[in-house]
């Protein structure tokens, strides 16, 4: 790598051109980082950690609801280790753009099942003990400036209270975090018991779905079938799938976000490819006499070609790395705003690595042709120019 | 002066083909920005147009109080329903049952939320845009349904004469309807009474559609509801209702489109700058010669700008054409958060979106050409003539 200073100074020989090209590449990879992360948010939970969890939903539509009496029957099914229920609450905090999922749950069992959610044991005790208690993901609490002990008003839309009001108030007793950066869609959770007592009597006892932990993930298929068979002929039949599959089906309802993101990205990369290729060709053309001098000094054909190729790889790699880094910062700054709409947005290691990989590949593709012409360069002819 | 500007610009534009390779960077770069911007804006416009077409000024929707945004979570009992029918200002009223069922999409084969709407005959009088285009209307009292055109295209098994299973009951598809390309075309319609018994809703309905004596009586209707303690209902004009439903996603898509286009535009602007600096540098001797012959600095600046803008315009037109031919009328369907159901809509590349795209292209061309143009004008003539 002793030629690195040479490559470096070649790169910045025409400072304006190099910087302009660099900025274009940065813009492209800034977009790459942002779009991939947003697409990732839509595929949220597809790679949830809990492969041993099943989701039991109403057979015909997720809006139907299931009677809570199913729970005891599900727990009795062979292969079920533990089960709980959750109910989609809907509702609005202050204004409709403050979107985050809210679920009434059974505190203890819920945190047992979602073992990747980490909560202080004392806060979990309080959550279980206090009727109107709620817990929130730590970053959500931070976003809205909630402190422990705050009362959080939520306006109900699906669930109204038996006393005729649509205003639900919860007391924040704790916050939880999600272990590692497993991209689960963290939710605002509150005590089911209180929710059930307070809602309109005719709607009591209805939940949205059940979450089941199985004893042996390899038998998930058989256990699902056994659960569904239990309710096959009841008026509330079920459909059981792994949590991963259930999330994937829901995400697919939004439409093929991945396809849209990838179409945009290909437009971006096609443009950048053309632009950078053009710059590199130009840079080479100007430098033909210099390259001839290098060859005269005893640089081999291969080495000269390599110099040109590495220059292009360096330029693209630099731009890629800077662009990806900028998208990381941008997501941190914009994250809370965007998460309101899109769920948890994170720059994953996979996005970072593939971005840098693509940048280097771009460098090779762009530099290949100029490198080959540099290699073919005839010293005598080139010096004459 | 004007003749000078004209002459040099023309001379410059004529020599453009010689710089075809590097000029294409501007064309493609700006074309890409415009194509992406126009396509995404067309998506947002198509979505909001589909929902906005669903509403009419003299129609209103009645929902349970507190669920002013969603038919799905609303229930109205018979007593309240009769009360609404008697109010002044209501010409026609239709009680409707609204529920969703999972039907696989043809494209993905994954289950998606499809609206099933149980309606009375008055629903057709209230919505005259609903017309049967194939087959016939459902007969009251039978398990028959008619499907919106888009629902037939999007979902598995919604074919004329086919039987579909919805929530443990079987239904025959007897006809297709059109509704001016509105969101209703993504729905399945059936007889209200049959739907109530099949879906075990007894005598409950979800919502009511009203045809009003005149637009704007919703306020007095809401007042009548509020003044009656035994009534818990809310009334919204249909236009406002659908605008509310489309707002969230339209804002999201539009914001996303501008965001992406802006970052791309920054990249394309740097590319344009690069190309124009290169163009100026290859023309150094030519420009210096012109200056030596007595041409002023302004014509030189204008000629470089003209080149950048001309290339940007070509790029913008190409990009807009790609978006137009590639996407205009392209049908997609998504989960509408407002109604929690699938709504099919077409990308709508409207003239004002095209204009927006072209304006972006021209601005980028100007931005990319300005500094190189100034540099060209500032070149010391004697040094430039020597070519260094």
Image (spheres, coloured by chain):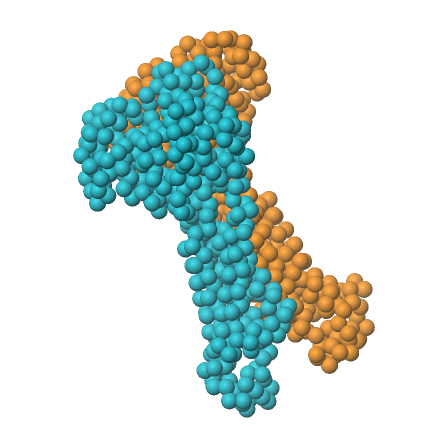
Chain colours: A cyan, B orange
Near-viewer residue (B8 or B114): B114
Residue B336 in sight in this render? no
Q: Is residue B355 left or right of residue A271?
A: right
Percent x, y of residue A63: 36, 29
Residue A22 in sight in this render? yes
Near-viewer residue (B217 or A328): A328
Q: Residue at the location (40% across, 28% down)?
A: A127
Near-viewer residue (B143 or B253): B253
Please say if A17 is above or below A71: below
Please say if B326 is above or below B245: below
Q: Is residue A165 left or right of residue B30?
A: left
Q: Residue at the location (29% across, 23% down)?
A: A67
Q: Residue at the location (43% across, 18% down)?
A: A161
Q: In which quadrant of the rendered view does residue B308 lie?
A: bottom right
The quarter of the rendered structure image containing the C terminus of chain A is: bottom right
Percent x, y of residue A190: 41, 28
Please say if A173 is above or below B74: below
Q: Residue at the location (41% across, 22% down)?
A: A131
Of all residues, the one furthest to the front in this rendering is A122
Percent x, y of residue B173: 30, 30
Q: Is residue A258 left or right of residue B253?
A: left
Percent x, y of residue B228: 51, 8
């Amino acid at each position: 790598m002793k030629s690195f200073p040479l490559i470096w100074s070649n790169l910045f020989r025409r400072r304006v051109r190099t910087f302009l090209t660099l900025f274009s590449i940065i813009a492209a990879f800034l977009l790459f980082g942002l779009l991939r992360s947003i697409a990732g948010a839509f595929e949220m939970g597809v790679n949830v950690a809990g492969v041993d969890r099943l989701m039991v939903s109403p057979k015909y539509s997720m809006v139907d609801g299931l009677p809570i009496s199913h729970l005891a029957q599900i727990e009795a099914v062979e292969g079920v280790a533990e089960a709980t229920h959750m109910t989609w609450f809907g509702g609005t905090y202050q204004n409709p753009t403050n979107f985050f999922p809210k679920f009434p749950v059974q505190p203890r069992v819920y945190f047992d099942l979602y073992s990747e959610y980490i909560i202080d044991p004392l806060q979990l005790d309080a959550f279980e003990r206090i009727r109107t208690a709620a817990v929130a993901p730590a970053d959500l609490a931070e976003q809205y400036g909630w402190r422990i002990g705050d009362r959080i008003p939520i306006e109900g839309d699906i669930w109204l209270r038996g006393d005729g009001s649509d205003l639900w108030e919860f007391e924040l007793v704790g916050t939880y975090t999600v272990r590692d950066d497993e991209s689960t869609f963290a939710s605002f959770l509150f005590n089911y018991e209180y929710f059930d007592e307070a809602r309109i009597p005719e709607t009591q006892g209805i939940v949205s779905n059940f979450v089941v932990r199985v004893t042996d993930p390899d038998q998930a298929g058989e256990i699902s079938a056994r659960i569904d068979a239990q309710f096959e002929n009841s008026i509330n039949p079920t459909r059981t799938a792994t949590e991963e599959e259930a999330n994937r089906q829901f995400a697919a309802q939004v439409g093929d976000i991945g396809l849209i993101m990838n179409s945009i990205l290909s437009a971006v990369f096609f443009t950048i490819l053309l632009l950078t290729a053009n710059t590199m060709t130009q840079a080479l053309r100007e430098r033909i006499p210099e390259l001839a001098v290098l060859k005269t000094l005893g640089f081999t054909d291969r080495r000269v070609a390599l110099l040109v190729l590495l220059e292009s790889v360096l330029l693209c790699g630099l731009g890629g790395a800077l662009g990806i880094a900028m998208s990381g910062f941008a997501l941190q700054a914009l994250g809370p705003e965007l998460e309101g709409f899109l769920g948890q947005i994170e720059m994953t290691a996979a996005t970072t690595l593939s971005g840098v990989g693509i940048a280097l590949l771009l460098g090779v593709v762009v530099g290949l042709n100029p490198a080959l012409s540099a290699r073919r360069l005839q010293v005598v002819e080139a010096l004459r120019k | 002066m004007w003749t000078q500007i004209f002459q040099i610009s023309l001379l410059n534009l004529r020599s453009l083909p010689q710089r075809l390779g590097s000029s294409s960077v501007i064309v493609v770069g700006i074309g890409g920005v415009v194509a992406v911007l126009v396509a995404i804006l067309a998506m947002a416009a198509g979505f909001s147009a589909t929902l906005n077409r669903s509403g009419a000024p003299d129609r209103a929707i009645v929902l349970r109080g507190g669920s002013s945004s969603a038919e799905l979570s609303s229930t109205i009992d018979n007593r309240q329903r009769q009360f609404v029918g008697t109010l002044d200002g209501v010409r026609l009223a239709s009680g409707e049952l609204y529920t969703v069922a999972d039907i696989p999409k043809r494209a993905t084969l994954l289950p998606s939320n499809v609206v099933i709407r149980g309606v009375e005959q008055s629903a057709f009088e209230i919505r005259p845009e609903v017309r049967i285009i194939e087959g016939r209307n459902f007969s009251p009292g039978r398990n028959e349904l008619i499907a919106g055109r888009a629902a037939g295209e999007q979902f598995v098994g919604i074919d004329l004469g086919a039987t579909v299973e919805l929530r443990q009951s079987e239904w025959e598809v007897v006809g297709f309807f059109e509704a001016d390309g509105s969101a209703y075309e993504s729905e399945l319609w059936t007889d209200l009474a049959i739907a109530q018994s099949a879906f075990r809703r007894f005598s409950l309905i979800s919502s009511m559609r009203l045809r009003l004596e005149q637009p704007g009586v919703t306020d007095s209707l809401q007042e009548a509801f509020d003044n009656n303690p035994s009534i818990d209902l809310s009334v919204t004009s249909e236009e406002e209702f659908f605008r509310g439903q489309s707002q969230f996603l339209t804002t999201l898509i539009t914001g996303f489109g501008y965001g992406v286009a802006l970052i791309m535009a920054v990249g394309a602007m740097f590319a344009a700058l690069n190309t124009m600096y290169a163009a100026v540098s290859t023309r150094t001797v030519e420009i210096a010669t012109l200056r030596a012959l007595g041409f002023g600095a302004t014509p030189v600046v204008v000629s470089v700008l003209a080149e950048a803008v001309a290339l940007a315009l070509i790029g913008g037109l190409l990009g807009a054409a790609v978006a137009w031919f590639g996407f205009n009328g392209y049908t997609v369907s998504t989960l509408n958060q407002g109604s929690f159901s699938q709504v099919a809509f077409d990308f709508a590349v409207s003239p004002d979106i095209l204009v927006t795209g072209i304006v972006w292209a021209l601005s980028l061309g100007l931005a990319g050409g300005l500094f190189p143009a100034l540099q060209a004008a500032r070149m010391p003539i004697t040094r430039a003539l020597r070519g260094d």
